[in-house]
Image: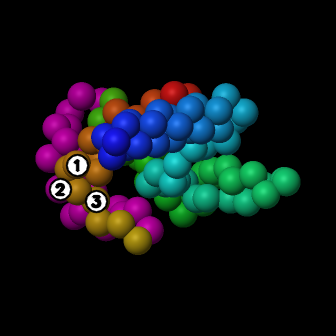
Amino acid sequence: MARNYVLNLAEETRKGMLEKARTGVYPSYAPPGYLNYEGTNNRRTIIRGPNSAPTIQELYKRFETGEYSLESLVVGCRAEGVTLPGRKLTTSLVHQILCRRLYMGEFD
């Protein structure tokens, strides 16, 4: 009985998140570089963080050159003092940023 409850709860959660996404509402917390924003009708959306967008753009530009591995990109950025507000640049964080389609204008 408990297993059925958990499976049903998971299914309902997925349906709710999918419905939010279909209506254009980001269904989760804001990823690094974005901020949660209460829009019209109390709909939570995300907006670009004004202090972190240039940093993310810089990460993409540097990685696009092909001269950097993830590790060297992080080490170089740390040496130059490039940071995300409230977050320490780590290899895993940079990997998440570079792989997420959200930063390219899409979310699924």
**Relative to the observer, which residue lies in front, 5 or 97?**
5
User: Mark number for residue 89?
Assistant: 3
Farthest residue toward the right?
Answer: 41
**Residue 66 falls inside the magenta stretch:** yes
In front: label 3 or label 1: 1
- Write down the region rendered in magenta: 65-85
Q: Residue at x 54, y 63 (%)?
A: 51
Q: Residues within 10 Å of mark 1 (few under 14, many from 20)?
A: few
**Residue 36 falls inside the magenta stretch:** no
Quick check: can you spot residue 105?
Answer: no
Q: Residue at x 28, y 59 (%)?
A: 89
How far across and down, in percent of the image, does residue 38 sit? 73, 60
Q: Secondary structure at mark 3?
A: loop
**Sequence order check, earlier mark of 2 and 1:** 2
User: Mark number for residue 92?
Assistant: 1
Q: Residue at x 72, y 33 (%)?
A: 23
Q: Residue at x 68, y 59 (%)?
A: 37
User: Mark number for residue 75?
Assistant: 2
**Left or right for 99, reference 103:** left
Q: Amino acid at mark 1?
A: Ser
